[in-house]
Image (cartoon, rainbow, N blue to C red):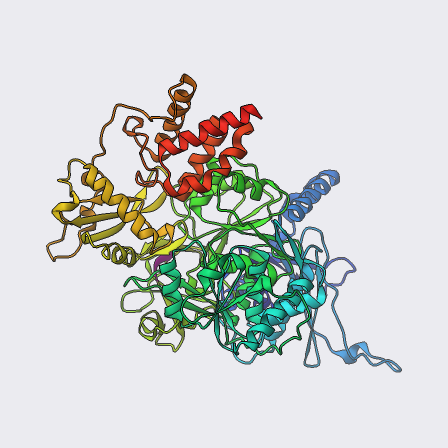
Amino acid sequence: MVARIAELITAAVGGKTRIMVPVDLRRHDKDLRSTANLALPLFLDATPGDSWSRIHAQLLRGMVESRELGEMNNGGLQQMPVWMARSILRAGMSIGTRTGGNLVSAIVSHTGTVDLDELSFPGFAATEVWGLPVHTGMVPLSIAVMEARDRTELVVSCRNGAGIASRLERLLDDIATALGAQGQPRTIGAQATRPGRTVTSIFDGLVRSAPDAPAAIGPDGQLSYAELDARADVVAAELHGRGVRHGDVVAVLARRTLDAVVGHLGILKAGAAFLALDPKHPDERILGILADSGVRHCVTERASKGRAAFGETDVLVVDDLPHSGADKLPDLATADDLVYVTYTSGSTGRPKGVQIEHRGIVNLMRSATDWYRLGPETRYAHYHTQAADMACAALLLPLLSGGAVVLVPDDINHLVLSEMLEGSTVNTMMVTPSLLEVMVRLELRPVGMRAVSIGGEALHGPLAARARELFGPDCRLLNSYGPAEMSIVCTALVLDDEPSAAPQPVPIGGPAADTTVHLLDPDRLPVPDGEIGELYFGGPQVARGYLNRPDVTAERFITLSTGERCYRTGDLARRLPGNALEFAGRVDSQVKIRGNRVEPGEVQAAIEQHPLVGRAAVAAVRRAERGDNVLAAYVVGGTETGATDGQERSPRSDQMAQQLRDFLAQKVPAYMIPAEIHIVDEIPLTANGKLDSAGLSVTDAVVREQATDTAEGPGSADSDRRIEDEIAAIWAKVLVVDVSTLRADSDFFALGGDSLASVEMLSQVSRTVVGRAGEAAFVAELEDLVHQLTLGRVCAAAVHAKLAGELG
């Protein structure tokens, strides 16, 4: 029983734990009597994923070896002066309270079975008995267990804090479920899923318990839980009146606004699942997803109404509806129902709709609540593309924990990042390593951050160390992992206060509650610990499958020989000592670009739709200087396209590369447009006739033109020329190119830049060239600039903004 409780506590903590188990010294001498403490501690170390049987074996070994007797010295405290020992203990208590890092995670005390008759006497019959837990500031949680007459009583003492009551209630529910279950406990995944809980039922409970608490915060105001609930009821009633029924899928096409939050919740309250679309994606992408999903209804806002009216789709405009007055619909959702659908890149050129059920998100909350310190104080930043599962996390995690989602409507730039990190509202967020790198380079000074989850791409030691320095010791940093098919996040590792700066990848940690992990070879047999295998996950977070794609679903969602249904990730990993997992690459060509999953084959298929393209190949290229991946496209066209001979780029090939970028901008999201497009005579093949990825070399394919002139600016004054030279130097540094190759018409994205690199470049231009007086004027021109980000246009905008700042 002690081992099972320790397993549940470890999963709730989401990281390494040390459990203290008091051992009765009378087991060594039954005649021992004293009014003093007759127990000494035995310590059990565990990590998420450790089975109860492994923890139990550790406990038995400790008792056989009488390890508790070795703790009689109390770590040497008895030999210290009282004032010194007291100071050390107080320091430990203070550090534990402030950082959440305690010397001991919990005390679990089992006093054994008590005979109630021995506590009874004439006139008094004992019917129940409880043990009082050990309470100490050094340990945040203490549980006392006592058994009597087929009853097991648990009494808990816990350090107070934000969200503690609800988290403690969930832990006790899980312990009660586990101890009352028949048969052996599960070996991986520590908490049993409470049957029947849904996203809507959890939200409704929070509305009842904290109606006035803020639920959504945006630049144009905020909504309390009661206000959000009332507005969502109006949307639900309207959708129901238009024919939306339990189990349907309804699209949402809206910006990051309060109306969008209302729309998402209204869809769920109507018994349907939401399919979020990003208004910034091209029409062809949106239309393709609507057609593939077969949705008949779309919730939108006035600003996007025209784009939502594709085909025969019924359009509901949220901001045209009243804010209250609708009757509540009965909550018909079950744990098996869909909560949302999100589309990911497909290797055949056709995106796939991942179907996530209520049970998956509810199960994620069991671990995420502790991983990310979620609770009423949470203010979770939502700046993500609405079409990604990171957006689902930013929306649902705070709204299911009593916190608030903080809406960031603007695209990411240095001022938006500064406001998010240095303002007083946001304290929780998810970031990709690529964006984290930009934050570090901008030398921002985050304030009040509680938790930052890093994920979407591989995280390496040097960046993890710089992240700890950036966010400070009071912020919990996690390296999170999870494909969309596993309900957002399925493993996490809490980073140490001083993470290693070694260049190796940071482990992705252990699994979420009730999540099983399998590392298998090509024959689906387990690989030994330490060896690389393909990652398979099981448990309640596994998606239902791909919407309307039974063929692809059968390929990825498989049943093991044990009968367990699992998701085959295509990711490679190894199990490290201590059970943490380390990501080790892919079994296929799939790649992460700025946290978004991209199949190069889908990009290749889009390029080959261009009438001037004969053949194309797309590969991921890792930029060592930035530590990220970018897409590089290699295109073979007809002789009229100006293909190169591999030695020099012609003006016509430059023109075709730009034409392809413009063409792709109408078909795929911005993150799927290659950072580099090379027009080549041929695409290298292996002896077997397959694509020779190793033969695709950026440096061999194209040698950039050498130009002796620097940027041609908007004027000829010496001050303008100095500005142009400074900006050209910034471009050269960010893009890692020779400054002499830059011209006024040099295109930032054509030279290998991406959106995150542009944030860094524009930030440096704004702060070091334009200056604070003209910064607002410069930022106001950014939206027009990014559509054609040439050196000449950036210089012109900088000169204009600097002049505006000087004139006041």
Q: Nearer the viewer, residue 160 or 550?
A: 550
The quarter of the picture where the N terminus appears is: bottom right
Q: Position of residue 801 (x, y in %)?
A: 49, 30
Q: Is residue 721 above or below residue 345?
A: above
Left or right: 396 in relation to 756: right
Residue in the image at 65% along x and 69% along y: 204
Q: Is residue 757 left or right of residue 36?
A: left
- Vertical relation: 769 (above or below) 542: above
Q: Is residue 571 magenta?
A: yes
Which residue shows up at 30% across the image and 32% down it? 737
Please identify the quarter of the rendering in which residue 772 is found.
top right
Give the percent coordinates (x, y) of residue 95: 65, 44
Residue projecting furthest to the top = 718
Q: Is residue 669 left or right of residue 416?
A: left
Q: Is residue 189 left or right of residue 164?
A: left
x and y percentages locating residue 521 in the rendered image: 29, 64
Residue 128 magenta = no
Q: Which residue is pictured at 45% across the width and 49% down the height?
A: 432
